[in-house]
């Protein structure tokens, strides 16, 4: 097992946007548990039916379901050299399950995209996703060239059911209660790199790549 890069951050912090860039740059498969669930919802699979209520009300899907889905996905050949996690882990039990599964083989880094709560609502409520691919847009911050149409694949853009203001507020509470403790979890293990998420997307990408290189250099020094 190679490299496992974890993206941490509140809903709307820019994890999906950055994961698309980092995945290209690092040559790692982009694994988004939110995208995997939305695919299951769309196809009305049994897993989608189990996850729907939790997602639409802004709650987390139970750990057992998420963990099973994630391990199934990362067992595929494209993850053999490592992978980039977007939206997982989101709870301490999920992080512990990942840590146990990886053992000491993998080179793990957690990148935390930092953003104030005040900036979250505007980001999430303006978000648009493509039905055809997983491209991410924003009504004002990153609008498509043609209204309602994906510039990557021509697909139709839509607003996520859980990106309405009340549900975003609920997700933010859940984030603080269940996911924010992961920052300390990875910091305790010396695996955390924090980056300011309130800059232009390209600048955030640069900062994340710089943070990754610095953490690799520190690893190399540590192993000498
Ligand atoms: P965001 O982009 O706002 O961070 P995601 O697309 O990652 O949201 O996730 C959407 C929803 O899918 C979450 O609110 C939650 O209901 C469910 N979900 C995704 N990943 C997880 C996870 N690791 N644990 C529990 N629920 C998850
Ligand atoms: P997450 O996956 O963390 O929920 P997304 O990557 O989906 O976040 O981004 C949430 C919304 O904010 C999207 O509409 C996206 O276009 C927009 N966005 C992402 N990064 C930035 C940024 N650096 N500045 C302004 N808007 C951004
Ligand atoms: Zn598209």
Image: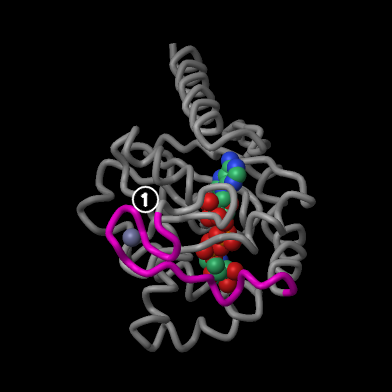
Residue shown at the point (61%, 36%) measured from the top left: 189
In-front residue for pair 205/136: 136
- Residue 62, position in %: x, y? 57, 76
- Vertical order, 158 against 213 (above or below): below
View extreme (left): residue = 77
Q: Is residue 63 left or right of residue 136?
A: right
The answer to whether one can see residue 212 in this image is yes
Based on the picture, tell me whether residue 194 belongs to the magenta stretch. no
Q: Quadrant of residue 185?
A: top right
Q: Is residue 4 left or right of residue 164?
A: left
Magenta span: predominant SS is loop
- Residue 165, position in %: x, y? 72, 70
Local packing at callout 1 (Cα closer than 10 Å; few below 14, some 14-19, many 20+) is many
- Vertical order, 133 against 184 (above or below): below
In-front residue for pair 116/98: 116
Tally of numbered tags: 1
- Quadrant position of ligand 1: bottom right
Q: Which residues are magenta?
A: 146-166
Q: Which residue is mark 1?
A: 30
- Residue 222, position in %: x, y? 50, 16
Residue shown at the point (40%, 39%) measured from the top left: 21
């Amino acid at each position: 097992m190679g490299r496992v890069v974890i993206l941490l951050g509140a809903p709307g912090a820019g994890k999906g946007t950055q994961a698309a860039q980092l995945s290209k740059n690092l040559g790692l498969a982009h694994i988004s548990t939110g995208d995997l669930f939305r695919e299951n919802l769309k196809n009305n699979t049994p897993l989608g039916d189990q996850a729907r209520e939790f997602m639409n009300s802004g709650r987390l899907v139970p750990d057992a379901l998420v963990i099973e889905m994630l391990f199934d996905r990362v067992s595929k050949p494209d993850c053999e050299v490592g992978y980039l996690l977007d939206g997982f882990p989101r709870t301490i039990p999920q992080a512990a399950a990942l840590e146990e599964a990886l053992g000491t083989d993998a080179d793990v880094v957690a990148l935390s995209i930092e953003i104030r709560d005040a900036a979250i609502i505007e980001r999430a409520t303006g978000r648009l996703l493509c039905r055809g691919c997983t491209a991410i847009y924003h009504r004002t911050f990153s609008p498509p060239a043609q209204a309602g149409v994906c510039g990557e694949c021509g697909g139709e853009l839509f607003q996520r059911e859980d990106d309405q203001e009340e549900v975003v507020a609920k997700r933010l509470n859940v984030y603080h209660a269940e996911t924010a403790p992961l920052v300390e979890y990875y910091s305790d293990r010396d695996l955390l790199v924090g980056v300011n998420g309130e800059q232009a997307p390209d600048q955030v990408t640069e900062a994340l790549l710089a943070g990754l290189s610095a953490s690799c250099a520190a690893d190399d020094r540590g192993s000498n």
